[in-house]
């Protein structure tokens, strides 16, 4: 599966953005999808993940209550709605597909994901 993220931009603190990740390929609905981010000088970190059928969702503690991940398997797209943005949310955001179809675990390491998109820059000004 190939992925392309979009929707990033510059926003003031407290604002909102909605990221989209469009997938090509026939097996999108078989994969747990994740959003990760990498801030300046930082390692890539987990943000959110949604199971292949949308039945289970996990978030990093830092974004719980502010971000919402969703997917539309008919449109081969996964979304990340980001509200109440903070300057520390500034990063390049990437979507990726888990390397194992129908992954049912709750451990999300970047090394377990593949098919990374090119990333989309999110900048939050204070």
Image (tube, rainbow, N blue to C red):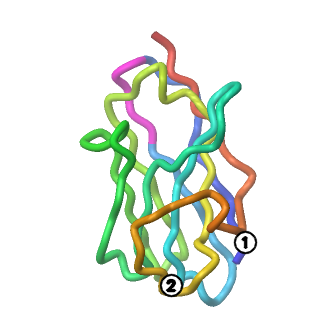
Tell me what residue is drawn at x 51 percent, y 50 percent. 46
| Position of 54 relative to 16 (above/below) | below
Disc ID at residue 2: 1
Drawn side of residue 79 relative to residue 43, left or right: left
The N terminus: image quadrant: bottom right
Identified at 35% across, 59% down, the residue is 58
> Mark 2, residues whose alpha carbon is within 10 Å: few (<14), some, or many (≥20)?
many
Q: Is residue 118 highlighted in magenta?
A: no
| Residue 45 higher or lower than 50, as above or below | above
Task: Name the residue located 68 percent from the left edge and 83 percent from the top edge.
Answer: 25
Residue 53 numbered tag: none
Q: Secondary structure at mark 1?
A: strand
- Under tag 2, what secondary structure? helix
Looking at the picture, does residue 35 appear above or below residue 90?
below
Numbered marks: total: 2
Label whose residue precedes the other's in the sequence (2 or 1): 1
Q: Is residue 35 left or right of residue 68?
A: right
Rendered location of residue 126, percent (x, y): 45, 10
Give x and y (percent) for residue 94.
Answer: 63, 51
| Residue corresponding to mark 2 | 29
Q: Residue furthest top?
A: 126
Image quarter for residue 3? bottom right
Range of the magenta residues?
A: 13-17
In which quarter of the view is residue 7 placed? top right
* Quarter residue 44 falls in: top right
Residue 22 position in % (x across, y down): 61, 66
Residue projecting furthest to the left? 65
Is the residue marked by circle 1 packed among few (<14), some (14-19), or many (20+) residues within 10 Å?
some
């Amino acid at each position: 599966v190939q992925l392309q993220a979009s929707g990033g931009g510059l926003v003031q603190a407290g604002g909102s953005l909605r990221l989209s990740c469009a997938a090509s390929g026939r097996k999108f609905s078989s994969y747990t999808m994740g959003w990760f981010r990498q801030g300046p000088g930082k390692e890539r970190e987990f943000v959110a993940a949604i199971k292949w059928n949308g039945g289970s969702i996990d978030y990093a503690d830092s974004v719980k209550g502010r971000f919402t991940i969703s997917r539309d398997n008919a449109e081969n797209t996964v979304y990340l709605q980001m509200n109440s943005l903070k300057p520390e949310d500034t990063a390049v955001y990437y979507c990726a597909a888990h390397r194992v179809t129908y992954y049912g675990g709750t451990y999300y390491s970047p090394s377990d994901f593949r098919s990374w998109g090119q990333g989309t820059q999110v900048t939050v000004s204070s």
